Image (spheres, grey):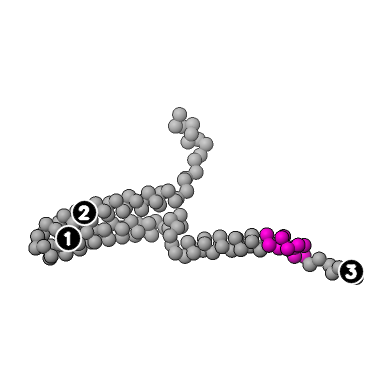
Amino acid sequence: MEKPPKIQGQPENASEATRDLASRIASAKRERHLEDNRSAGNDPKQMSGMARGMRIGTEFIAAILVGTGFGYLIDLGLGTSPWGLLIMFLVGFAAGILNVTRVVAQMNAASPLPPVSAGADETEK
């Protein structure tokens, strides 16, 4: 009895089939992970200038508002008006600056370096 002709694309043995399946699963997982990152908008490389500016501004304003809110609550509770509000406003301002520097450093680390031309190296010497 003759063996049926080999169907193109099918592996000859089980270990080959397992490797093929494992590589296809790994490839699908990588594609899914990349797509999830793109859809979530967490990829700083893909952010537009407007999105970067909005994120930086939001980080800064949110820290100031939270600090000011805590200061207002301290003033209400302790009756120290306006000192709690003023001090916590300054703490929120400082936290906002720290948040902005952290976000900008994170975005700079994630963005690719600009290409260096051959002529630029010679002019620096």
Instruction: Estimate the x, y position of residue 101 in percent, counting from the top left.
Output: 32, 50
Name the residue type under label 2: Val
In the structure shown, which secondary structural element does the residue marked by tag 2 occupy?
helix
Q: Which residue is situated farthest in the top direction here?
A: 125
Q: Is residue 18 magenta?
A: yes
Name the residue type under label 1: Gly
- Left or right, residue 96 beside residue 26: left
Label whose residue precedes the other's in the sequence (2 or 3): 3
Magenta extent: 8-19
Q: CA distance from mark 2 to mark 3?
A: 84 Å
Q: CA distance from mark 1 to mark 3?
A: 87 Å
Which residue matches tag 1? 71
Label whose residue precedes the other's in the sequence (1 or 3): 3
Instruction: Estimate the x, y position of residue 88 in percent, counting from the top left.
Output: 18, 57
Location of residue 18 by image quarter:
bottom right
Q: CA distance from mark 2 to mark 1?
A: 9 Å
Q: Which residue is situated farthest in the front direction here?
A: 15
Instruction: Estimate the x, y position of residue 125 in percent, counting from the top left.
Output: 45, 29
Confirm or deny contact between disc 2 and disc 1 (CB under 8 A).
Answer: yes
- Mark 2 or 3: in front is 3
In the structure shown, which secondary structural element does the residue marked by tag 1 occupy?
helix
When the figure is inspected, residue 121 is found, relative to residue 98, above or below; the finding is above
Which residue matches tag 2? 91
Label whose residue precedes the other's in the sequence (2 or 1): 1
Q: Is residue 30 magenta?
A: no
